[in-house]
């Protein structure tokens, strides 16, 4: 459990994102059925559930990759029946992917720089000339990217094409790219999957620091229960596309339905 | 024995005997090489950004050339016609994005490839309808492209450079360099490389695929226009011109479908190799009668021979399958 009161803002209950009655089908497959929950400003919200429960699909709905057949999404007070990825990104939603999705041919630096795409304003003509305001802008973005690189302790790989990096570092670069967007809501899909213990601890520390230092709201999918209990303020549990529990970690841990879902009790 | 002599000694002796002729041959190879590189670049851009092998690249060259000449024949001043043609290529890019790419997003590559077949036949039909099927003469003079030749004395002989070839080499090189800077240094260039690597990651950082596709197809349209003008000025503008797209294929085999430097170096190798083969090797090996027809397949032969020794292509990394 996190120290009580670590998120003073949460009590005020400002809702950053609300998902209401969302249903998503692929042909006959019901990936999500009538799920509602909210994410409050400044909290770390875990989404857990067995394989195929619809967790990744939910993130895809939130950042506009999937369009649900039913339901609404309210982000920062604006309600939509569907998001578009471009809108989600420009409104302040960043994400990482379950199976890292990086720009493999590009260096760490360029990958993270790509996260600043929407922040760059100067026309490409000036950028080509590398002159005046465009150059100043590029330098400013570079400075911010370097800060992220420092923060994530990846100075040593900044010029390495990311395709050559070990998996654990790739996940870290991917987090860096998402942070470069200066998001209000950060969606992390199993950020610690496939990592060793030490890498997991590092990643936990980064996630907590991002949340504390930048006040970034985080939605986190994770299978490691220890990690979930340590990091999250509130947990929503999905099973077969339905929500079966929602609350603080201690509550959820004792919930009979959750225990059954994880032990695989017959329905 | 005689065959070995004909391959490994004869042609080189011939080259040494008349160095001025060799320079002439190399120059002509260089000029076609730069133009091949330009065409190949059009393919590479589109392939990188949208994963589509654009069968329509050749017809786009013809279409751009016909539009330019057609407008001029309709009474539009040459430079205004050039501007309007650029506008037409932009409109074409927007239409392709709306009508072809957007509805077919996430479909298998083969479907998109087939769609570019459709595009090809549409452009042929549309082009013939508007401009007629007859070959047209490129308005090279009106665009102030130079004509005539400069003769350089060299090795006791004369090397003759067509001025239009010099212009073509200079313009194509400038375009290639400009594109390289554009894609390496600018935000849009970075976005393009990002899209080439991962669509979903690109989307997640707010890159608009639709915008990138329009930019890329427009760029390919500009490249097609430049190719159409240069090539058209050397022969004429007709639908037969679209087969120069076939010249880009060996370049792509050599340089890789996704590599900009590959397209450039590959283009030069094919261009120069083709001319050397045509003038020195083919007549020595096949006899002068057969050697004449060599132009249509020699480029493929060079590319395939090269692949025997370097299967990953010019700039590809060594392929190591992860098991
Ligand atoms: N693009 C798609 N097309 C068809 N079915 C899909 C698609 N995406 C997800 N599904 C289906 O939706 C269901 C939920 O998948 P999802 O990936 O959201 O689960 P998950 O909770 O993230 O599982 P995991 O823990 O294994 O990552 C699965 O049955 C899956 O097969
Ligand atoms: Mg998942």
Image (cartoon, coloured by chain):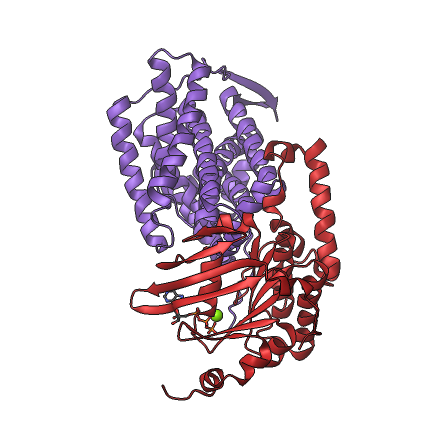
Q: Colour of chain A?
A: red
Q: Where in the image, quadrant-wise, is ligand 1 located? A: bottom left
Frontmost residue, B78 versus A39 = A39
Q: Is residue A131 visible?
A: no
What colour is chain B? purple
- The residue closer to the viewer here, B187 or A261, is A261
Q: How many marks?
A: 0
Looking at the image, residue B40 sits to the left or right of residue A103; the answer is left
Q: Residue at x 35, y 29 (%)?
A: B63
Could you tell me which residue is drawn at 52 percent across and 57 percent down? Answer: B310
Q: Is B296 rendered above or below residue A106?
A: above
Residue B227: image x %, image y %? 44, 30
Residue at 54% across, 77% down: A223
Left/right of residue A73 with respect to residue A126 in the rendered view = left
Residue B118 coordinates in the image, percent (x, y):
28, 42
Q: Position of residue A192 (x, y in %)?
A: 60, 72
Evaluate whether residue B242 shows in this view.
yes
Q: Is residue B54 above or below residue A102?
A: above
Hey, which residue is sitting farthest front in the picture?
A12
Question: Where residue B159 sits in the image (x, y, percent)?
Answer: 55, 24
Residue B171: name its quadrant: top right
Image position of B70 (left or right of A51): left
């Amino acid at each position: 459990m996190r120290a009580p009161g670590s998120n003073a803002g949460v009590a005020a209950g400002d809702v950053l994102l609300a998902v209401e009655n969302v249903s998503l089908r692929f042909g006959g497959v019901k990936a999500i059925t009538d799920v509602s929950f909210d994410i409050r400003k400044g909290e770390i919200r875990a989404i857990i559930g067995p394989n195929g429960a619809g967790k990744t699909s939910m993130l895809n709905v939130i950042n506009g990759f999937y369009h649900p057949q039913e339901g609404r999404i309210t982000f920062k007070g604006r309600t939509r029946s569907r998001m578009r990825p471009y809108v989600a990104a420009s409104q302040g939603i960043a994400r990482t992917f379950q199976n890292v999705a990086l720009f493999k041919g590009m260096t760490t630096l360029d990958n993270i720089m790509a996260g600043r795409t929407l922040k760059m304003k100067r026309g490409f003509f000036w950028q080509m000339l590398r002159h005046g305001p465009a150059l100043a802008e590029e330098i400013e973005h570079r400075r911010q990217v370097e800060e992220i690189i420092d923060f994530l302790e990846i100075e040593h790989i900044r010029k390495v094409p990311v395709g050559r990096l070990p998996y654990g570092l790739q996940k870290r670069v991917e987090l860096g790219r998402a942070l470069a967007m200066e998001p209000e809501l950060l969606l992390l899909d199993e950020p610690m999957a496939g990592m060793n213990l030490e890498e997991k601890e590092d990643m936990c520390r980064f996630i907590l620091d991002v949340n504390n230092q930048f006040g970034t709201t985080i939605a986190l999918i994770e299978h490691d229960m220890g990690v979930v209990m340590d990091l999250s303020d509130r947990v929503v549990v999905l099973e077969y596309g339905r929500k079966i529990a929602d609350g603080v970690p201690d509550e959820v841990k004792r919930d009979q339905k959750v225990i059954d879902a994880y032990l695989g009790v017959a329905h | 024995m005689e065959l070995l002599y004909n391959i490994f000694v004869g042609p080189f002796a011939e080259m040494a005997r008349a160095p001025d002729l060799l320079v002439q041959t190399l120059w002509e190879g260089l000029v076609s090489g730069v133009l091949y590189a330009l065409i190949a670049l059009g393919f590479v851009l589109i392939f990188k950004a949208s994963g589509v092998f654009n069968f329509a690249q050749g017809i786009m060259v013809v279409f751009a050339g016909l539009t330019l000449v057609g407008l001029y024949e309709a009474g539009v001043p040459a430079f205004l016609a050039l501007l309007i043609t650029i506008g037409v290529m932009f409109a074409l890019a927007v239409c392709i994005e709306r009508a072809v790419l957007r509805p077919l997003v996430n479909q298998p590559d083969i479907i998109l490839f087939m769609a570019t077949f459709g595009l090809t036949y549409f452009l042929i039909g549309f082009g013939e309808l508007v401009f007629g099927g007859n070959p047209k003469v490129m308005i090279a003079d009106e665009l102030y492209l130079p004509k005539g030749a400069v003769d350089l004395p060299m090795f006791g002989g004369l090397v003759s450079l067509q001025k239009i070839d010099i212009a073509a080499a200079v313009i194509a090189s400038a375009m290639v360099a400009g594109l390289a800077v554009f894609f390496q240094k600018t935000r849009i260039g970075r976005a393009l490389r990002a899209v080439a690597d991962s669509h979903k990651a690109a989307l997640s950082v707010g890159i608009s695929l639709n915008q990138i596709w329009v930019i890329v197809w427009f760029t390919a349209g500009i490249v097609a226009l430049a190719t159409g003008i240069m090539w058209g000025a050397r022969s004429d503008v007709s639908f037969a011109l679209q087969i120069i797209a076939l010249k880009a294929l060996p370049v792509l085999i050599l340089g890789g479908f996704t590599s900009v430097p590959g397209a450039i170096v590959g283009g030069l190798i094919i261009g120069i190799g083709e001319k050397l083969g045509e003038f020195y090797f083919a007549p020595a090996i096949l006899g002068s009668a057969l050697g004449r027809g060599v132009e249509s397949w020699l480029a493929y032969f060079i590319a395939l021979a090269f692949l025997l020794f370097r299967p990953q292509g010019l700039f590809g990394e060594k392929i190591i399958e992860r098991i």
